[in-house]
Amino acid sequence: MQTIIPTTTAERETFIADYERNRRRSEFLFGLPSPDAYYDRPIPLRHPFIFYEGHIPDFSFLTLVHNALGGASINPEYEAFFQRGIDPASLDVAQQAAPPSWPSREEVARFARACDARVLEALRTAQLEDPNNPQLVDAQAVHNILEHEPMHHETLLYIIHQLPLERKRRLRFEHEDRQRPTYRRARVAAGIATLGARPGSIPFGWDNEFDEEPVAVGTFEIDVDSVTNGDYLDFLEAGAEPPPFWRMKDGVWHLLAQFDVIPLPKSWPVYVSHDQAEAYARWKGLRLPTEAEYHRAAFGTPDGDERAFPWGEEPPDASRGNFDFARYDPVPVGSYPLGASAWGVNDLIGNGWEWTSSDFRPLRGFTPMASYPVYSADFFDGKHYVMKGASPVTDRRLIRRTLRNWFYADYPYVYAKFRTVSV
Ligand SMILES: [Fe+2]
């Protein structure tokens, strides 16, 4: 038996502040769809909004209070009902997963308040770190719930994005377009890309971020800037399908931004599916970077060291990239010179996730995590592709070298950009 580590008051205060910050943002985001859109399902393969408003606090309660700490149930029926979201493998599965009728919004709110009260009580008083309980090693269950909620904030915005504009509250943002930058490529020297981390070497990571896996990568060249809407327009004229967020209006291409349809900003990164990114690269006679090449371009340095972030060791802030909800849409590529990597590659974190050519697979030594064993394991099917980096609506808490995101190759609703490489 190892000694139990008492959680300090300062740690508890940070956990509580972070939980409450997440809950405030959830409340704000669930206020964006019009009240009469609450049962809408703008992405048919996802649940309606009501599911997520119950799911997020339910997951926090189940993961920390019920499963890790052994706390008593609040409402077993609702706990089971809101437990798990779905991966859009097929519409049939999604329809089968849909219950015949949903509870009222008031009932969901009451359940959510009860979950919050129990989670906050645990964060104030429970033994949150326990080396003898796999779910509480390094306070795993606490970090788990504090990252799960902002992940849903992003995917919730993908769903809100697909609502007709008249069915949501529209926030006002200025949008800037510029001249497309001159096309440039950076040469990245051969070296080691360290994927993943050793357990215990970072405060928290999801199971797919462990163990450490060094990969030898040869020299390659990579686009300094992400492929833009303007670049993709050339591909369209050569016969490609339009990207999912593009809309034709009065014979001119426009972009469906989160709250507006705007003339296509040619200097913004183009958001596309993995299939479309790959097709563009092929058309250029190039290819997408592997996950290890992304790591080399983002975190490698000419002197052989590897950095925590493209810009160095300093934590992410608003000077380094377009992330953490500063806005809900992209900005022109190359807007953050202070976020460039050691090789001068721009926007590797922020302004949209970056597609890689690597399918989502376990790193060497993968073990399903105790507090959420199905988090990754269900998706190692060779059909999901790894995305790295961050989008405008990725919380800063999720920005770290080891974080991996993944989607189906043809999933069209994700905020993902790309760039091309060649040897
Ligand atoms: Fe979830």
Image: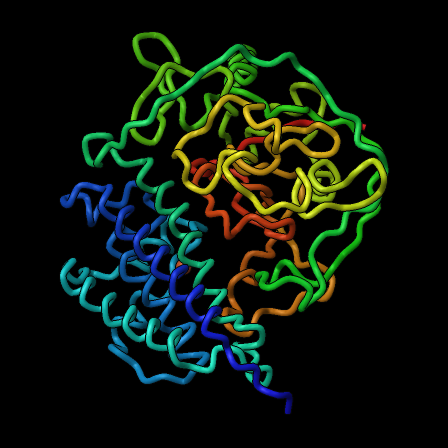
- Residue 12 in picture, x, y percent from top left: 44, 71
Residue at x 66% of width, y 38% of height? 311
Q: Is residue 318 left or right of residue 109?
A: right
Q: Hey, which quadrant is residue 328 in on the image?
A: top left
Viewer-proximal residue among 365 and 91: 365
Viewer-proximal residue among 221 and 98: 221
Residue at x 38% of width, y 56% of height? 93
Residue at x 34% of width, y 18% of height? 262
Q: Is residue 133 left or right of residue 256?
A: right
Q: In the image, ligand 1 is in what quadrant? A: bottom left
- Residue 27 in picture, x, y percent from top left: 26, 52
Residue at x 32% of width, y 64% of height? 57
Q: Is residue 45 above or below residue 182?
A: below
Q: Residue furthest bottom?
A: 1
- Residue 149 in picture, x, y percent from top left: 40, 57
Q: Residue furthest front?
A: 10
